[in-house]
Image (tube, coloured by chain):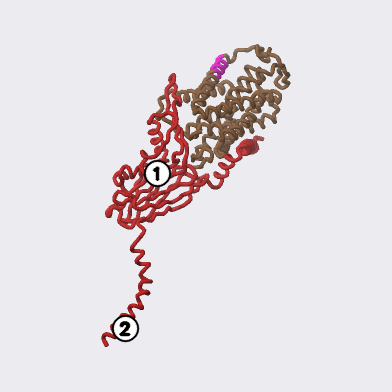
Amino acid sequence: MPAARERRAGRRLFLLLPLVLLFAAPAAAQTIAPPSLTAELSVSRIEVTTAFTGGEILVFGATERLIHQQGDEVVVLATGPNTSMVVRQKINVLGFWINGPSARFNRIPAYWALASTRPVAEMLAEDERAGERLGLGLLQLPQLGARAPRFRQALRELKQREGLWVDQAQVEVSGGRLFHVRLPLPSSVQTGLYRVQVLLVREGRVAARQDLALDVVRVGTAASIANVARDAPILYGVACVLMAAFAGWLGSVLFRRS
Amino acid sequence: MQVYLPIAEMSVDALLLLGIGFGVGWLSGLFGVGGGFLLTPLLILIGIPSPVAVGSGANQTLGASVSGLIAQWRRGNVDVRMGMVLLAGGFVGSAAGVQLFAWLRRAGQVDLAVAIFYVVVLGTVGALMVRESLGAILRRGRARPKRLHEHLWIHGLPLKMRFRKSRLYISVIPPVLLGFSIGVLSAIMGVGGGFMLVPAMIYLLGMPTSVVIGTSLFQVVFVAANVTFLQAAQVGSVDIVLTMLLLAGGVAGAQFGAAMGGKLRGEETRALLGALVLAVAAALLWELLSVPDQPFVIGPAP
């Protein structure tokens, strides 16, 4: 009897097994590979209107392990569209300060901002940082014209002063695993596609990464004016002449003294 | 209240622009000049890039001069024939000036060129105005020989033409050259050039004062229109939002200025204007001579 009961119980267990596996499988997969890093942007589009005074890129997310305590660190790197800049040195000629030698930098980011939970230099080795370009000093700045390194230095300083290059902002941590950072965008920011990389650093290596995209677009009147001026300069020139003439005429009508 | 300028690609306080427009308009109403020579340096001072300041300054001058031209036209104070001759030179001059401007921009010397033009031109004109008006104030009361106009060697050149309204029979070469030089200056400095044109028309061409203001406005309006068009089409540096804000303030300011200008005597007005012109020139010269606080400047690659 006990043997028969045992056998029946065994058969019942055998029948239940696939069912148990069916339910257990997703749960098991979740515990095997939880996302070690999740990040998101508050907006995927920043609109530049005639009332635009600057904005910010808000990056937020969470890590699986505790930040700092369990060795996880977060790095956020935002890069704007490429641009070309000229750096000119002022020189004194006969008492006058004029623009002297110049260096041209092609294909450099119009916007560049680095933020992290701890200084990047403390969490990553030099070669790791160089590979990911984590640092204003590691940014590739191909230089044409004047060769001296002081032009490169001036470019870094002046871009930082304009708030267009940020090295480095602090990523804030709350509750051990939630992080967020606000990267400021000044009003002189260039329109185009921005790339935001969020890296998870564990034991001196990049353990996970997430790529996010942000569109900075001109909209409304500002967009139409800039587009017309660029695409139909002749039409725009005529429009400027007519509008100013009309405004002047309107003024003379409004303020006409009888 | 901040407003984003789509061509300058920056945001500026709209009230500041209205205020600058009002102040410049007030002075231009007071002195009967376009005021572009004050406007462009002021715009550069508040951080507007030089090319945009020059392009939009010319556009503002156009709008500000139109109402003056309409008023003068109604009173029949425009010598159209003389205006056309000046304009012929002015069109060529402004076209050449915009080419020169575009070339300077590529060479990265726009800021310097604009500053030097301002210092030289404003310094000369301001000094001449102060000297002339002070002389007139000192001579006041003494009788002067009445003559229609002085006969200079300039009037002896060939290609003579009769200008009925100006009561002149002179060669067209001086007015064409005058129009040409004002056109070049207009393109590079973003001014109408009224403050140079008016004395030149009186002292060089010998035109009667009654038609000088109207005829110079005629030239200024069309040359400024040409500069605006060429700057917009070729350099792409005219910001219509900036222009309209300046005009809105300027039109109102001009009325107050004109009302006040009626109470001042001619010589005093000219002496004050001369002093103002000299002050702007001195401020710009100081900028050129003082050690820059930043040894490097950056800008977008042309």
Q: In this figure, which residue is indicated by the disc labeled 2?
A: A8
Which shade of the palette goes to chain B? brown
Choose between B10 and B122: the one closer to the eye.
Answer: B10
Extreme-bottom residue of the structure = A1
Q: Nearer the viewer, mark 1 or mark 2?
A: 2
Q: Which one of the lettered chains is coloured red?
A: A
- Report the residue at 43% width, 51% height from top: A212
Crowding near the residue tagged with mark 2, few <14, some 14–19, many ≥20 C-alpha atoms within 10 Å? few
Which residue corresponds to mark 1? A113
- Chain identifier of the residue bearing label 2 in the image: A
First to last magenta residue range: B128-138
Question: For numbered disc 2, what is the local secondary structure?
Answer: helix
Q: Is residue B120 magenta?
A: no
Where residue A122 appears, as percent x and y from the top left, is 29, 45
- Residue A166 % position (x, y): 38, 42
Question: Of helix, strand and loop, which one carries label 1?
Answer: strand
